[in-house]
Image (spheres, rainbow, N blue to C red):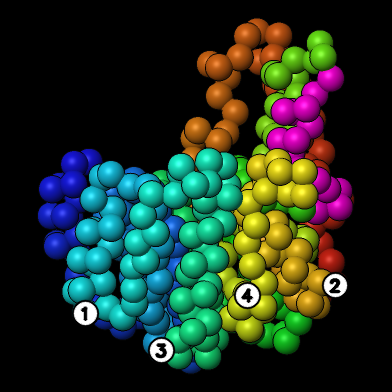
Amino acid sequence: MAVADATDALAAMPKPAGPHPGEPRLARRAVVSGVARNCARHLPRVLENLALLGGLYAEVCFVFAVSDTTDGTHRLLSNWLAAGREGRVLDLGDLEAEIPIRSARIARARNACLEEIRRSRWAAYDHLIVADLDDVLEGDLDLAACAQAARWLDASAGRAGVFANAAPRYYDVWALRHDTWCPGDCWHPIWHRPHGHSFEAAKIREVFSRQIAIPPGLPPIAVRSAFGGLGLYRMTFALGASYRGVDGQGRSVSEHVALNLAIGAAGGQLHIFPSLIVQAPPEHLYDARAFGLRWRLAMLRRRLVEARTPPWRAWSAGPGVRPS
């Protein structure tokens, strides 16, 4: 989508309104935060979803950070806010020369959003909603599930964050930390695999085999870290932590892990909320066309095992975590 087309689409969007018909407004205030680089073609649909999500709250504002963009993303976000919405777009300029590791740049941008919130009256708001501004949120968003997730988050003082599931499969295993499902960084064993071990085998083992289909009717799944394109945090927990995009060895890591582990260390409980569903980006999922016959057969065997014995059966349910 060209910038002019995206601008026209944004201009045609409805102005800020109340909650979606039939969905009562939450007696809470929220900040919606996102970072962007060249997301213009996705923004009309994404911002429409964020406006609907924000409409669930009694008060909402938006904090975006933009860097290294060449497609008019900053202008589109600024124009959208100018149409009667409260918030700010942070222009971080060109970071790539200073910070060559992509995950570290994203961490810088997300931390800039946190810092903007900390020094504003928005720090007293109840929830921080962290959203990706790309194709993850271009699909239809179930507002009833969003409201249910927010209410479930507030139902117990120890609950610090809930994260989206995805269709057709949970995809974001890089940000995921779960003692059984994904205990460590999925990409480090791929990047540092022993000589003679194939990339295909490593990626199937470390990434694709962990991208499982999670039924939306399951209770929330306790994790040490997750994201998946959309997360709702209690503001107090989020502002007590920060993002980091490299580990102690200088390796790229998902920026969400450091924030989430810090929240966990502070006593916060984190869960994937299965009925809160976003659209899994196809480029992050297994595509049989990218693999030879040997690997297609290997993946087919894994999928058949998953269908027969879904891995979530062993660890998804637990006392006191069913949505209410």
- Report the residue marked by disc 3: 58
Identify the residue at image location x=38%, y=73%.
62
Q: Is residue 292 left or right of residue 102?
A: right
Which is more foreground, mark 1 or mark 3? Answer: 1
Asked whether residue 223 appears in the rendered view, the answer is yes
Residue density around tag 2, few if under 14, some if 14–19, many if 20 or more, within 10 Å? few
N-term-proximal mark, 1 vs 3: 3
- Report the residue marked by disc 2: 319
Residue density around tag 4, few if under 14, some if 14–19, many if 20 or more, within 10 Å? many
Q: Quadrant of residue 210?
A: top right
Identify the residue at image location x=40%, y=71%.
63
- Report the residue marked by disc 1: 84
Q: Secondary structure at mark 3?
A: strand
**Image coords of residue 177 (percent x, y):** 77, 53
Amino acid type, label 1: Gly
Q: CA distance from mark 3 to mark 2?
A: 31 Å
Q: CA distance from mark 1 to mark 3?
A: 15 Å
